[in-house]
Image: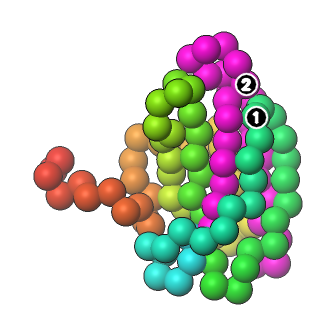
Amino acid sequence: MATLRIVWHEQTSDFGLPMPWFGSWLVGDGETEGGWFHSDRGAAETLHEPPPDAVGVRLRFWPSEGLDPEYIDLPLPASGLIETIALDYDHPGPHTRLDLSQHR
């Protein structure tokens, strides 16, 4: 993939403000977080050149500001496009580091 395009859709936090978003690369085996590539609030459409060792992305968001962020891990999409509004935040991504073995 040459370029990753992310559509950060407008969403509102619990405080009625535009949602804070933060994007970083997952590198190597997908269990290592690399450098970050996006930090902003609200709606945006951004283009990013993945580093050679990138295998995915971690997208963090703060629905309740002041608390820890929620996040989703995703592989780099073959289409080159991620739309945040279409993501399923209730299920772990293929590169998630959460230990879900006790929740089965």
Question: Which SS class for mark 1?
Answer: strand
In percent of width and height, residue 84 lies at 66, 43
Residue 97 is labelled as: none
Q: Which residues are magenta?
A: 1-25
- In the displayed structure, would residue 55 be above or below residue 103? below
- In the displayed structure, would residue 50 be above or below residue 12? below
Which residue occupies the foreground of this view, 64 or 73?
Answer: 64
Decide which of tag 2 and tag 1 comes sooner along the chain. Answer: 2
Is residue 26 at least partly visible in the picture? Answer: yes
95 with respect to 85 (left or right): left
- The residue under label 2 is 18
Separation (CA) of disc 2 from disc 1: 6 Å
Which residue occupies the foreground of this view, 35 or 63?
Answer: 35
Q: Residue at x 51, y 58 (%)?
A: 73
As shown in the figure, which amino acid type bears the numbered disc 2? Answer: Pro
Q: Residue at x 14, y 52 (%)?
A: 102
Does the stretch in magenta take in 24? Answer: yes
- The residue under label 1 is 41
